[in-house]
Amino acid sequence: MATNLLIRLPSVSQEVTIGRDWFVERDKLLAEAGTLKTISDEDSFKRGAGLLSGITKTSNKLEKMRRDFSRPFNDALKTIKKASDSARAPLESVKKELKSRLSFYADEQFHKYEAAQSEFMREQKECSEKQEYFKELARDEFGDSDTELFNPSFVEYDPGSVRPGAENVAIKSTLSFEIASPGEVPREFLSVDEKKIRLWLNLHRDEIKQKLKDSPECALSVIPGVKIKLETDVVSR
């Protein structure tokens, strides 16, 4: 039974303000960062560390504000998509099944068409060769006269089965694939999963760090084809 679909959306603010204080703090940090050209001693390192911490906190403050403000909009988008997907689901299911049946019929008809066309071309070629054969006989028997012993009439191609088509659909040949034997797929079609590498490194972090400290040359043997690097990184707290 047909009915209206009512989607209730969460209330959202019509405007958002990024306060002047935040911009003042941002500009202050940028100006200070511009004066810190090098890190060459303990004092400059501590100054840089404090600056890094301030920059991180100020940037994260605005990012949190953005996330908080965007949440109702994201919730609204999810609500609309969920309701829309649910309403479309029966159509998409029927569409998939109908498209499959149409494609099967079109493929079947194309094969019939191509077979009939091939047979027609074979018959035309045979007819032409026969005509040329009798012309040769006529030339041998009567010289260069215009006598014709065989003059077949060539008909337009009409194989009986026609190419399928309809004005509101397009029929085209496409390529698709499915993985039959994953182990036989050539390397150029494979990609490295860096997420899995990072996860593995994190799980074996202490062990690998010690290996690299003891034997830096093992950087290329921990994971074949991957160079593991032990780096120093300063993280804001």
Image (spheres, helix red, strand yellow):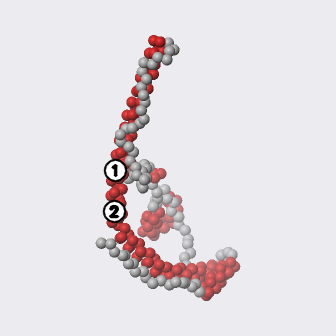
Position of residue 97 relative to residue 13, above or below, is above
Asked if residue 21 can be seen in this view, the reply is yes
Kindly indicate the quadrant of the structure image that contains residue 161.
Answer: top left
Position of residue 198 relative to residue 140, above or below, is below
Residue 104, horizontal then vertical, whole percent: 34, 50
Residue 87, horizontal then vertical, whole percent: 36, 70
**Quarter the N terminus occupies:** bottom left
Residue 57, horizontal then vertical, whole percent: 56, 82
Q: Which residue is mark 1?
A: 104
**Residue kind at label 1, given as amino acid type:** Phe
The secondary structure type at the circle numbered 2 is: helix
Distance between the alpha carbons at the discs numbered 2 and 1:
17 Å
At horizontal 38% and vertical 41% (from top left) the residue drawn is: 113
At horizontal 45% and vertical 15% (from top left) the residue drawn is: 138
Q: Is residue 215 left or right of residue 169?
A: right
Q: Which residue is mark 2?
A: 93
Q: Nearer the viewer, residue 155 or 169?
A: 155
